[in-house]
Amino acid sequence: MAKPSQTTVQSAAMSNSTTLDQVCEILKKHATAVDSAASWPQESIRAIADTGMWMPANMREFVDTTRRLAQACTSSAMIYLMHVCAMQVIAASPDKQLLEKIKSERALTTLAQSFWGAREPGASERQGD
């Protein structure tokens, strides 16, 4: 497989930057209404998913994207961050078909975590668990 030229890499980065700029404008447009109504940022999440930004290529892209999204709409950025964290867990699993299905359907993922004893009555009052 041929290695992409520096120009190709720069063009891809420029295109991704332009796309991220456009997504951030959509997030900014809806951020105040989302925050004041404590509502789900439907348009913003759809914009992120429609651009294919659901799975960043590397940690630098993830950090930059999250930072930029957070500047536009903190609620949408938090959802993006939680989705990417869950996708990393799924990507590390042996079920590669699940990862491809999530990508092709532009599905939103998240994590749920539970600790032994956390649901038992009085668990929050016990010490040393």
Image: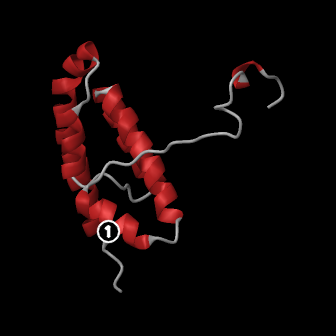
Q: Spot the residue most to the front.
A: 121
Residue depicted at 24% across the width and 49% down the height: 49
Q: State the quadrant of the N terminus.
A: bottom left
Q: Spot the residue most to the bottom.
A: 1
Which residue is more in the foreground, 14 or 98?
98
Residue depicted at 15% across the width and 25% down the height: 29
Residue 7, percent from left and from top: 26, 67
Left or right position of 35 against 127: left
Q: Which secondary structure, mark 1?
A: helix
Query: As displayed, is residue 69 above or below residue 36?
Result: below
Identify the coloring. Answer: secondary structure
Q: In the rendered structure, which amino acid carries the disc numbered 1?
A: Gln
Query: As displayed, is residue 27 above or below residue 85?
Result: above
Residue 65, percent from left and from top: 35, 43
Residue depicted at 17% across the width and 32% down the height: 25
Figure quadrant of residue 87: bottom left
Left or right position of 95 against 40: right
Residue wearing tag 1 = 6
Residue depicted at 28% across the width and 28% down the height: 72
Query: As displayed, is residue 60 above or below residue 93?
Result: above
Which residue is more in the foreground, 110 or 123?
123
Left or right position of 77 against 45: right
Q: State the quadrant of the C terminus.
A: top right
Residue 39, percent from left and from top: 25, 23
Which residue is more in the foreground, 19 or 32?
32
Figure quadrant of residue 43: top left
